[in-house]
Amino acid sequence: MSAMVVCLVMATMSLAGLAYDGGRVVSTYMQMSDAAQNAARLGGQQLVGIRNGHPHIDEDLATSAMRAYLVARGLTGSFDIQGTRATVVVSTKVPMRILGIIGVGERTIRVNRTVDVVDG
């Protein structure tokens, strides 16, 4: 009888952990995705060289703007500017509160968002 109770408790803890911790992971991913996309858009707005026919993103201005945007939201990231393309990569770790009890540690969430400025 006690083995069955232990199994039921573990199953209940696992399901509760999947619901709670899984929800936290999805919510964090969505927030990070929005922040990364908005930061990339902000970087894409730092376009120079339009009048001379060679439009490109100013790397220093874009990196500063994207970094400031992420820092204001408590995030850090890496940035890549190539021509008219701005890429933002954001990652963070989410600790498992309930699943941690049964041995599942933290999960790393990584989001990669790119903006390509086109004329059209």
Image (tube, grey):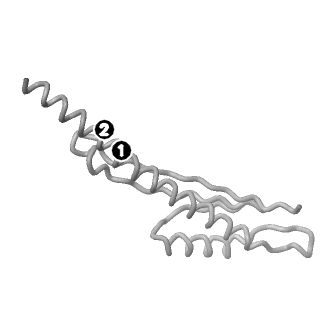
Task: Give the amino acid at mark 2.
Answer: Leu
- Identify the mark at residue 19; answer none if there is no mark: 1
Where 67 falls versus 36 (above or below)?
below
Per the image, the residue denoted by label 2 is 15
Q: Is the Cβ of the residue at disc 2 closer than 8 Å to that at disc 1?
A: yes
> Which structural element holds mark 1?
helix
Estimate the x, y position of residue 15 in percent, counting from the top left. Answer: 30, 38
The structure residue drawn at horizontal position 32% and vertical position 52%, both measured from the top left corner, is 95
Query: Image quarter for residue 104?
Result: top left
Q: Going by the image, does 35 lie left or right of 47? A: left
Q: Quadrant of residue 74?
A: bottom left
Within-10-Å neighbours for mark 1: few <14, some 14–19, many 20+: few
| Image quadrant in which the C terminus is located | bottom right
Residue occupying image coordinates x 69% and y 70%:
59
Amino acid identity at mark 1: Ala
Q: Residues within 10 Å of mark 2 (few under 14, many from 20)?
A: some
Residue 93 location in percent, x, y? 39, 54
Where is 36 relative to 105, above or below? below
Nearer to us in this view, 119 or 67: 119
Q: Nearer the viewer, residue 47 or 22?
A: 22
Q: CA distance from mark 2 to mark 1?
A: 6 Å
